[in-house]
Structures are given as structure tokens and as C-alpha cells.
Amino acid sequence: MAVLHNQVLLPANYGELFSFWTRFPDAVLFAGGTSFLRYSGALAPAGDRGSGFPKNILSLEKIDELHRITRTERYLEFGAMVKLNEIIALGKIVPSALSRTLKDLASWPVRNLATIGGAICQKFRVVSDVAAPMAALDARYELRTANQSRWISALRYSSVSESLENRELLTRIRIPLELWNYTVCRKFKSCTTDDEYGGVLIFLAKNQKEILSDLRLVFAGETLFRDKNSESFLAGRALPLERKDTQHYGALWETYLAGLGKPGPMLRSKLVNSIISILLGLSD
Ligand SMILES: Cc1cc2nc3c(=O)[nH]c(=O)nc-3n(C[C@H](O)[C@H](O)[C@H](O)COP(=O)(O)OP(=O)(O)OC[C@H]3O[C@@H](n4cnc5c(N)ncnc54)[C@H](O)[C@@H]3O)c2cc1C
């Protein structure tokens, strides 16, 4: 039998979804559809309109579970189809590292269509801006195939191609709710062709009785960067921090990034300067 093309498949539950996926193995998951604008609308490169648009589409729209938002004392959980603007509209219950990053991502109309699952799994960039707050907040992702589901930490989820198995989808995103006294979000534009992606820097810190009891610093650019070594150097120090410690922390990051060879030198030096300036905000 000839394979049918140009199908828009609308499963109502996971059973239907995986059975469609078996019948149409080339079907591409479709959430808010914003990443497909490149192929069809005004964002399509000249002369490239329509090329590369998937032949068969597997829409996640009708799967109720994927639209759910759950809050407990310990965590906030989103189904993969929750829209970015819906998350922003939840207000103060959303950790500010996440809501601030979302407010800076694309424009209001795009955020009204785009979903949190699509943002994490998008292929526009290797690593989405959203990956930075997710990794800093120690979020976890539920991934599901026809036969099993598994949880993976946001820090380990590096990109769609490396993290998702064949015919696997992201279903839930769980974010621990912790009190962070200090949150900084900075978005970097790309500086040179070496730094194609720019990225987002998130810094979180806890102040318990004038002690820096916990901190996280994550940069999501071409890949995800988090240096636990430098975090343990500062954790437990008295606040305000001594200036020499802030400089040393910056130097540890410089060494860490130089060792990785990414991002390019200009973005790296902007990043390290930014890290030092953030920490100076915690020093006397
Ligand atoms: C004008 C514009 C500006 C942008 N600016 C930024 C920016 O500044 N920073 C940034 O990080 N991003 C940016 N983006 C990318 C944007 O974040 C993504 O287009 C959007 O988040 C994708 O969400 P969506 O729901 O529309 O997903 P879709 O476009 O429907 O899907 C995106 C990809 O993920 C796959 N997918 C979707 N849902 C799932 C799932 N649950 N499990 C597995 N795979 C899935 C799809 O097959 C597709 O490959 C921009 C996009 C546009 C159009």
C-alpha cells in the first residue's frame, strides 16, 4: 500500500499517538508550530518557502494531559503543551529565573503559540534559552515512548538529537520550588560568528543568616555550562563576600570555559565580566 502524505494527525491520548507514529514513522511532532514558521511564513528564507516542511504532522493539541499545570508544596509541573504566556500569567508562583527568561524570549504573539515542550525541544538553536533556568532550578523532564517513561535532569538533557530516543516525546516538566533570595538573568546576543548562539546566564543564590548557603550559575549558549567546582568554592562563605573571592570565582569560570574551548573568546570574556559583576553585587 502506498504511504499517505500530507496528513495532520490529532491523537487524543498516548495510545493513539504511538499507534499513529508507528503507522507514519516520518510524522513530526507539532506543538505550537512556531519553529515551522521558518518553512511557511514570512520567516521563510527567500525561495525556500514550503521546502523542508514536514509531510506528516503529529499534533499534540488534543492530548489533555499535556495541557495540565500542577502545583504542590514542593514543585510546579507543566505538561509539555502549556504555552509560554500561560506560564508567565501564573505570576509569582513561577520561579523568577523562568518567568524572566520567558519574557525575554521572542515576542508576545510567538509566546502565545509556543509551548514549553516545544521551547525545550526546538531545533532553532542547539540549546534553548529556557534550558538555562531549567538547569539552574534543577528541573526534570519526563520523556515517554510507547513502552516506557523515564525522568532526566534538565542539566543532562542537552539537545533533542542527543537526548530523545527514536519516537520519544517530552511529556512533563517538573520544577522544584525553592526560595532563592537572589536571581539574576542576563541574555547575551551573539558577538561574532564564533559565538553563533549568544545565550542566557542565570545566577541563583540563597542567603541563610548571612551565609551564602547555596548558589547555581548556568549559561545556556551553544551548549549548557554549569561548573559545580566553582559553586563549591563559594558555598558556605559569609555575606557580604570578600572581593578577592569574587575575582577568584570569575577566574575559576574563565579556566572552566577556556578548558571547554567554548564559547568564543569575545563572548567568554563578556560572560566572565558579567559573572564578576553579579558577584560584586553580593560583596561589600
Ligand atoms: C520570531 C522567533 C523568535 C525566537 N526567539 C527565540 C529566542 O530568543 N530564544 C530561544 O530560545 N528561542 C527562540 N525562538 C524559538 C522558539 O522558542 C520556538 O520556536 C518555540 O519555543 C517552539 O515551541 P512550539 O510550541 O511552537 O514548538 P513547535 O514549533 O511545534 O516544535 C518545535 C520542535 O520541537 C518538537 N517538539 C514539540 N513538542 C515536543 C514534545 N513535547 N516532545 C518532543 N518534541 C517536541 C517539534 O517536532 C519541533 O521539532 C524563536 C522563534 C521565533 C519564531
Image (cartoon, rainbow, N blue to C red):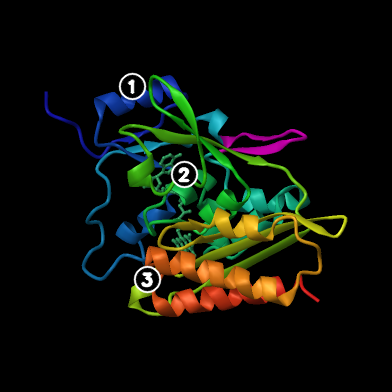
Question: In what quadrant of the picture does the C terminus appear?
Answer: bottom right
Q: Secondary structure at mark 2?
A: loop
**Sequence-wise, which precedes: disc 1 or disc 3?**
1
Q: Which residue is mark 1?
A: 19
Residue at 63 percent of width and 49 percent of height: 137
Q: In the figure, is residue 154 to the left or right of 233?
A: left
User: What amino acid is found at the position of numbered circle 3 in the picture?
Assistant: Glu
Q: Which residue is mark 2?
A: 156
Q: Is residue 278 visible?
A: no
Residue extent of the magenta highlight: 67-79
Residue at 51 percent of width and 47 percent of height: 155
Q: CA distance from mark 1 to mark 3?
A: 39 Å
Residue at 39 percent of width and 55 percent of height: 35
Question: In what quadrant of the picture does the N terminus appear?
Answer: top left
User: What amino acid is found at the position of numbered circle 2 in the picture?
Assistant: Arg
Foreground residue among 53 and 117: 117
Image position, residue 13 (x, y; %):
47, 24
User: What amino acid is found at the position of numbered circle 1 in the picture?
Assistant: Ser
Q: Crowding at label 1, few (<14), some or many (≥20) Cα neighbours within 10 Å?
A: few
Tell me which secondary structure the magenta stretch mostly adopts.
strand
Mark 2 vs mark 3: in front: 2
Mark 2 vs mark 1: in front: 2
Q: Which residue is mark 3?
A: 196
Q: Secondary structure at mark 3?
A: loop
